[in-house]
Image (cartoon, rainbow, N blue to C red):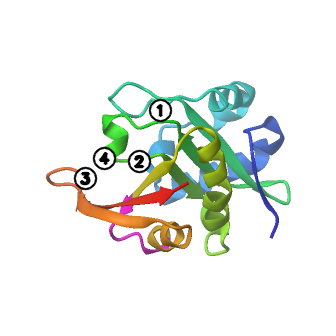
Amino acid sequence: MKLSLVKPSVEYKESFLAALQEFQKEGLPWVMDIDPDQLSRDFEDFVAKENSKMTLWTEAPPVPQTELWAVLDKEYVGRIAIRHQLNDDLKIMGGHIGYDTRPSFRGRGIASSMLAQALPIARSLGISEALLTCNDTNVPSIRIIEKCGGELRERKPQSPNGPMKRYYWIQL
């Protein structure tokens, strides 16, 4: 498998839109508000925004974020985000690195490869120790993070009534 991490590009429009449908069918929260028809018409603008992304989904001040797409045989198969620093929200939810694998490509080592390739990039951004979080019930993510050197330091609810989260740190 030759998986590459690339900057978002219009070259992957069709496979990105197909992946979006898969993510929306699954109910992935951060893609549910995206209108596929509108995105298809404005894909160049979307790509430009992805390439200059800030963490806008947190209430704390936004931080720079490097957004990379995972491509396998010229097909979009996932994304990984590297947040250049932590704000208060990212310390609780999200951490330095977050990733999603296209549902039809799960179980093939995509996420492990994305994370392994993203760690040196995070290091080059000045991150010496990366925080990754996941739900306590997300066994695939737990395996991926631990396989890539994650050390579990804490388990706690994300919020008073929220799900139990795991907080892993990876030395870079």
In this view, 94 is above or below 111:
above
- Amino acid type for the residue under numbered disc 1: Thr
Q: Are marks 2 and 1 in contact (CB under 8 Å)?
A: yes
Residue at left offset 78%, top offset 37%: 9
- Amino acid type for the residue under numbered disc 3: Gln
Q: Tag 1 or tag 3, which sits nearer the N-term?
A: 1
Residue identified by numbered label 1 = 55
In the image, the segment drawn in magenta is 134-140
* Quarter of the image where one finds residue 74: bottom right
SS label for mark 3: loop
SS label for mark 2: loop
Left or right: 48, with 147 as reference point = right
Q: Tag 3 or tag 2, which sits nearer the N-term?
A: 2
Residue 158, disc? 3
Q: Nearer the viewer, mark 3 or mark 4?
A: 4
Q: Position of residue 164 (x, y in %)?
A: 25, 62
Residue 80 among magenta residues: no
Q: Are marks 2 and 3 in contact (CB under 8 Å)?
A: no
SS label for mark 1: loop
* Alpha carbons under labels 3 and 4: distance apart: 6 Å
* Alpha carbons under labels 4 and 1: distance apart: 14 Å
In this view, 51 is above or below 145:
above
Near mark 4 (Cα within 10 A), the count class, few <14, some 14-19 or many ≥20, is some
* Alpha carbons under labels 4 and 2: distance apart: 7 Å
Near mark 2 (Cα within 10 A), the count class, few <14, some 14-19 or many ≥20, is many
Residue 92, disc? 4
SS label for mark 4: helix
Q: Are marks 4 and 2 in contact (CB under 8 Å)?
A: yes
